[in-house]
């Protein structure tokens, strides 16, 4: 006949394992639930991303209104946004920077455009356009203040 202490230890161990099984079953259920939620979140993200990409592709620069004045909005550069979607002034600026073959200053761009670069009030709006193109990822501004095209 089996020793009663051995039987007690076997029974105790079986109880421990049953408790562990119950805990692991709960954890497995929680993991499965979270994985299902993540799968659903992925599907929603893909659908929303596709919708946003479709909306961006159909967007072209349109005049906006700021302080009662009509202004042209400059779109951010992206795979679905073509350079031809930029306003003509900005297209000319990009062309000048590209043709320069290296970094250029606002003054150099202004000279090519025929802007009176010695007059600060004429040069600063051009610098603003260069910075706007930089902010929208069409150009890159170097630490020395010169502008160059993005690769």
Image (cartoon, helix red, strand yellow):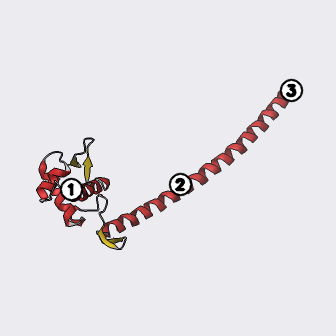
Q: Assign a secondary structure to mark 1.
A: helix
Which of 61 and 47 lies nearest the eye of the viewer?
Answer: 61
Q: Residue at x 30, y 69 (%)?
A: 71
Single out the mark in the foreground, 2 or 3. Answer: 2
Q: Are marks 2 and 3 in contact (CB under 8 Å)?
A: no
Q: Does 149 sit above or below residue 43?
A: above
Q: Residue at x 15, y 45 (%)?
A: 102
Which comes before the other along the chain, label 2 or label 1? 2
Circle count = 3
| Image coords of residue 141 (percent x, y) | 26, 47
| Image coords of residue 113 (percent x, y) | 13, 59
Task: Specify whether residue 50 is in view.
Answer: yes
Which of 5 and 58 lies nearest the eye of the viewer?
Answer: 58
Which comes before the other along the chain, label 2 or label 3? 3
Which of 49 and 139 lies nearest the eye of the viewer?
Answer: 139
Q: Are marks 3 and 1 in contact (CB under 8 Å)?
A: no
Tell me how far mark 3 sits from mark 1, CA to CA. 96 Å
**What mark, if any, has residue 123 been given in the picture?**
1
Q: Does 92 sit above or below residue 3?
A: below
Q: Residue at x 27, y 62 (%)?
A: 81
- Callout 1 environment at 10 Å: few (<14), some (14 to 19), or many (20+)? some
| Image coords of residue 48 (percent x, y) | 44, 64
Which comes before the other along the chain, label 3 or label 1? 3
Q: Assign a secondary structure to mark 2.
A: helix
Q: Quadrant of the N terminus?
A: top right
Q: Which residue is mark 2?
A: 38
Q: Which residue is mark 3?
A: 5
């Amino acid at each position: 006949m089996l020793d009663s202490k051995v039987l007690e230890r076997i029974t105790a161990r079986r109880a421990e394992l049953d408790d562990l099984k119950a805990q692991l079953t709960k954890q497995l259920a929680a993991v499965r639930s979270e994985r299902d939620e993540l799968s659903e979140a992925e599907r929603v993200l893909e659908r929303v991303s596709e919708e946003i990409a479709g909306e961006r592709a159909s967007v072209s620069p349109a005049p906006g209104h700021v302080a009662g004045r009509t202004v042209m909005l400059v779109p951010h550069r992206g795979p679905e946004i073509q350079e031809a979607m930029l306003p003509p002034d900005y297209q000319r600026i990009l062309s000048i920077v590209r043709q320069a073959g290296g970094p250029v200053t606002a003054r150099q761009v202004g000279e090519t455009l025929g802007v009176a670069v010695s007059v600060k009030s004429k040069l600063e709006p051009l610098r603003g356009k260069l910075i706007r193109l930089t902010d929208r990822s069409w150009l890159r501004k170097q630490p020395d203040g010169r502008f160059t095209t993005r690769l």
